[in-house]
Amino acid sequence: MARTKQTARKCASGVAKPLQLAGSKRPRLSSSENTTPLSSPLSSPPLSPVLQAITHPEQRNRFCYLCHDGGNTLACSNPACPRVVCNVCIEIPQELEGIYGSPEISFRCPACHEKDERVAQSKPMPYFAFTRMDNGKLLPACDTPAFVRGTCERASKSQVCGGPILVLHFIYTGMNARGSLPRVLNTALEEYHTESTLRYYEIFFDFGTWDKLCQWESKAEQLVAEVGLDIFQHKVVFVSVHSEVSCGDLFAGKDENNEDVALKPNEVCI
């Protein structure tokens, strides 16, 4: 891990004894023993979500994925695509004025067009954003390809979601969260959300003793009741913690002597 101002004096790794909450001593394996490293749930990347058909209009993005703002938005006709593009980034041709919005005219976003190119493994194809059905065939609704004024600086799979988002940042006791990635993320999202659609919480945890663990469980129940997890469409969880330098166990808190104690990664259940 790179050294920063926060870790200049204390690295993200350190020495901590194994935590014994249940009263039974956990054996420590010597470095000479052949062990299979444990896979941490924190280090395993989540699987890519599979796009499903949009069943409710509110599931679509609220902002143009090209400029992240824009005026009136055009919804992609692909039922599995939640993206919208504004009429500033893609202008509606004059020949379609007055008839766009009718069932026979559909719009396909640049991201879906790019995906079609990759699937077909073809050379770049002209982007006809507006199409119409003619005797069961999908044909361009305009004579000339669409002109995209906006520039997408992110991957074509990116979205600008406007659904309610909950960001939980669990921080090991004593760590400094100043300048952390969760805070940066919250600052970036504030531009697209109101106070009711974006919640950010920083929760310091310390369950180094059995009494602290009981207090933590009570605190967690109060947090769930206060936040109301069911109202949020997206939930993002961060954990900022040190790791034990010799075996990679995660710091869990302070014991009765205010000494650091650690748990195996698969035993940490914040």
Image (cartoon, grey):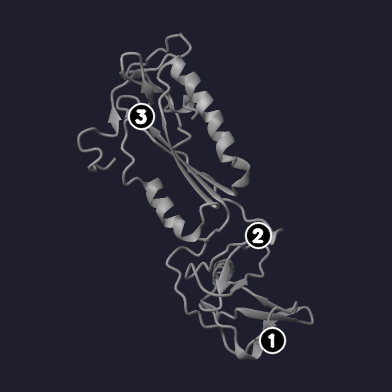
Label 1 vs 3, first from the N-terminus: 1
Q: How many marks?
A: 3
Q: Residue furthest left?
A: 9
What residue do we see at 63% from left, 70% from top? 75
Q: Which mark is residue 98?
A: 1
Label 2 to label 3: alpha-carbon separation: 39 Å
Q: Nearer the viewer, residue 187 or 196?
A: 196
Q: Residue at x 57, y 52 (%)?
A: 164
Q: Amino acid at mark 3?
A: Thr
**SS assignment at label 2:** helix
Amino acid type, callout 1: Gly
Q: Secondary structure at mark 3?
A: loop
Query: Where in the figure is residue 180, as x and y percent of width and height?
Result: 34, 45
Residue 58 is labelled as 2
What is the x, y in percent for residue 247?
Answer: 34, 25
Q: Cβ–Cβ below 8 Å for labels 2 and 1? A: no
Q: Is residue 23 left or right of residue 77?
A: left
* Nearest to the observer: residue 27 or residue 223: 223
Mark 1 element type: loop
The alpha-carbon separation of the residues under discs 2 and 1 comes to 25 Å
Q: Quadrant of residue 100?
A: bottom right
Q: Is residue 179 above or below residue 158?
A: above
Residue 86 at x, y percent in the picture: 55, 74
> Relative to residue 71, is residue 18 drawn left or right?
left
Task: From the image, tell me which residue sits under label 3.
Answer: 173
Question: What whole-number distance in Å separates the C-alpha atoms at marks 1 and 3?
Answer: 61 Å
Q: Nearer the viewer, residue 42 or 165?
A: 165
Q: Amino acid at mark 2?
A: Glu
Label 2 or label 3, whichever comes before in sequence order: 2
Q: Residue furthest right?
A: 135
Position of the N terminus by quadrant:
top left
Sequence-wise, the earlier of marks 2 and 1 is: 2
